[in-house]
Amino acid sequence: MIANLDSVKHSYYKIYKPYGYLSQFINNQNKRRNKKLLNSLYNFPDGIMAVGRLDEKSEGLLLLTTDGKFSNHITSSKIEKEYHVMVDGIITASYIEILKQGIEISVNGQPYNTKQCNAYILDDISHITERYVRDKKHGTTSWLSITLTEGKFRQVRKMTAKLGFPTLRLVRIRIGDYKLGAMQPGEVLLTNY
């Protein structure tokens, strides 16, 4: 008899992926075996997978699940992903308008025009957990919010760099209706779909 897969109970988690962790559970790299992996944060069930990714130098909200349908839904272009980004320099409203319209970046060595997005300058960053990035003597910084419905490799970093404002810190604070809220780096919460 074949089990009804729809009746299988799935697990859903939201975590605050800390800076310096890979969004994976197994290190497939031969050269760098001492990388920090998600399974060191919590005893996750078998079959767990990260829904989307955050690169090693990015932090913030990451969803984990054993449910492939949920994963496909969340990574679709229907779901917004919001990032709060610290950039090198003082970004102005005119640059924000350029971001909103979409800009050309490189994806897999080919030119790619990003979709229109929502972006604005952040005045209050009290909700962001403090983390040392660099001394103030190395120049001024500013924060902005960017909300995307696509997720190309290192897209936010490429977008800000294209405008001359390299990303110094990137924190994903929202995926659809799921929010980082007051979670702290490394914190894991069991959640519902």
Image (cartoon, helix red, strand yellow):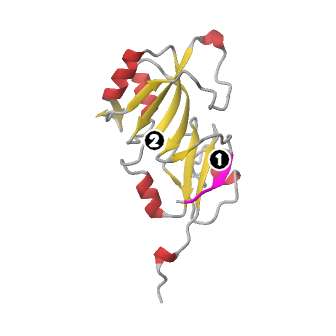
Verify whether residue 188 appears in magenta: yes
Q: Tell me, yes or no, if residue 103 can be seen here.
A: no
Type of the residue with mark 1:
Arg
Question: Percent from the top left, x then y, of residue 64?
Answer: 56, 55
Q: Which label is found at residue 33?
A: 1
Where disc 1 sits, the SS reads loop
In this picture, is 110 found above or below 32? above
First along the sequence among labels 2 and 1:
1
**Left or right of 167: which side holds 103?**
left
Residue 100 lies, in percent from the top left, at 35, 27
In this rendered view, identify the residue nearer to me: 31 or 190: 190
Q: Nearer the viewer, residue 25 or 4?
A: 4
| Residue annotated with mark 2 | 81
Name the residue rendered at 57%, 12% in the picture: 140
* Residue 114 is inside the magenta segment: no
What residue is shown at x 51% (from left), y 46% (from top)?
53
Residue 102 image point, x, y percent: 32, 29
Distance, label 2 to label 1, CA atoms, is: 30 Å
Q: Residue at x 60, y 55 (%)?
A: 13
**Badge 2: how crowded within 10 Å, few (<14), some, or many (20+)?**
many
Q: Quadrant of residue 161?
A: top left
Say which amino acid is labelled 2.
Lys
